[in-house]
Amino acid sequence: MLPSFADRIPPWPLHDEADEAVLLETLRSHRWWRGNGARGDAFGAEFADYLGIAHVRLVANGTLALELALTALGIGAGDEVIVPACTFIATASAVLRIGAIPVLVDVEADTLNIDVGAVEAATGPRTRCIIPVHMAGQAAEMPALLALAQRHGLVVLEDAAHAHGARAFGAMLGTLGDASIFSFQSGKLMTAGEGGAVATNRPDVAAQTFALHSCGRPQGDTAYQHLMPATNMRMSEFQSALLSGQLRRLNGQLATREAAAPVFETALRSAGLSPLVTRAHIERHSRYMVMAWFDPAEFGGRDASALSAELRGAGIPAYRGFPPVHRTGMFTGPEAARLLHGRGAPDYARLDTPVAEAAGSRVIWFHHALLLGDEQLLHDVAAAVASLRTPREMVRGTDFELARSA
């Protein structure tokens, strides 16, 4: 039985007295709404300045940010959008929600980022957009993807939900494509429980996002002008107030995680896992997750779900890798058939994505809060992983069973 880590893992999210003060100030101001408050404008400007980008539009969550950005970029019914098969479902479900067709492609084994060769092979006459996901905070191969997009007349929407503060290719992630999205959901590196943002240097996209995220109304409207079919995606003033404090602490936390991650990865290798690589173009890795491959045969036949569940039972925040997007009920159930009927969608059951398929059962990831702990914690977590290992040559022997029971 594994020892308990429940009292050793740093809490997440973190907050301080300044956060409490600004929330109380917002409460007492009676200006809780994005329409009459100033917190949203202030945080939006702060985040844009931090990223080095012209425009940031704040919304209620990261999934809505994807829908908003795609719509503002002109993606609509029948358009094909290339999405990595290994990602959180929202990257693909947002495409479905606006009536477009997700085309799922495989990822690189060593980074789990979208495979540029697979993108090239999947690009066709109906392709309009590529959504690279900066998995776990490491940059996708943006120069190659941008060059490919230029050749084919495509737009690039960066999914930077994992990449707050990450840098590569001389720029902050989220500033390289036509637009980008960020998530501020509870587990993210900056969080207000929920929240999201669209970032762009394109004034046309920025202008579109305002009306689209605010019931179709232009900025400053008091005459109930509704210029287009739209919905309400606005972030609240309380969320914006919290996020200013999250941004204030971000660089310090990134530095702590960046120093701790190599220590943890080395320890995990000794425990029988194979962490993802960090490519040479990475200037600052956000370390949203520490992701690692493993061989189930080396861990008593446990797949990623079983291994991570056993670790969570000991209080270690470990989780399975994302299942391939097109193997979820969203793409295999009757609703998918209804949404995609007659649109010429690919046969998702026949898509060949061997890396994404393997990652769903052979990759686990560890929450970034671990990297804010002390070095001994990292070594002890790795030792807990190692204690579950059953090297093949020992499985049939009694030495292993005696070691486990000692």
Image (cartoon, rainbow, N blue to C red):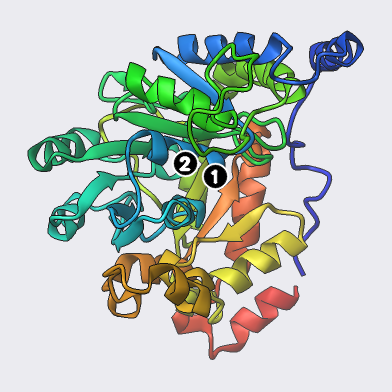
Instruction: Specify the label residue 66 is tagged with.
Output: 2
Residue drawn at point x = 43 percent, y = 56 percent = 92
Residues at marks 1 and 2 touching, judged by CB atoms closer than 8 Å = yes
Res. 391 visible in picture: no
Please state the horizontal and vertical placement of residue 99, each as a whole percent of the image: 40, 56
Please state the horizontal and vertical placement of residue 128, each as a whole percent of the image: 23, 46
**Where is 87 relative to 230, above or below?**
below
Residue drawn at point x = 80 percent, y = 19 percent = 32
**Where is 361 relative to 401, above or below?**
above
Residue drawn at point x = 68 percent, y = 52 percent = 317
| Kind of residue indicated by mark 2 | Leu
Between 239 and 166, the one nearer to me in the picture: 239
Please state the horizontal and vertical placement of residue 350, each as a whole percent of the image: 29, 79
Circle 1 packing at 10 Å, graded few (<14), some (14-19), many (20+), is many
**Where is 275 relative to 250, above or below?**
below
Between 84 and 207, the one nearer to me in the picture: 207
Res. 143 visible in picture: yes
Instruction: Specify the label residue 248 is tagged with.
Output: none
Residue drawn at point x = 74 percent, y = 42 percent = 9
**Element type at marker 1?**
helix
Question: In the image as oriented, which residue stretches furthest toward the left?
Answer: 151
Looking at the image, residue 6 sits to the left or right of residue 52; the answer is: right
| Kind of residue indicated by mark 1 | Thr
Cα separation, mark 1 vs mark 2, equals 5 Å
Instruction: Specify the label residue 63 is tagged with.
Output: 1
Please state the horizontal and vertical placement of residue 167, each as a whole percent of the image: 37, 24
**Element type at marker 2?**
helix
Between 204 and 218, the one nearer to me in the picture: 218
Question: In the image as oriented, which residue stretches furthest toward the bottom?
Answer: 396
Looking at the image, residue 177 sits to the left or right of residue 147; the answer is: right
User: Looking at the rendering, which quadrant does residue 304 occupy?
Assistant: bottom right
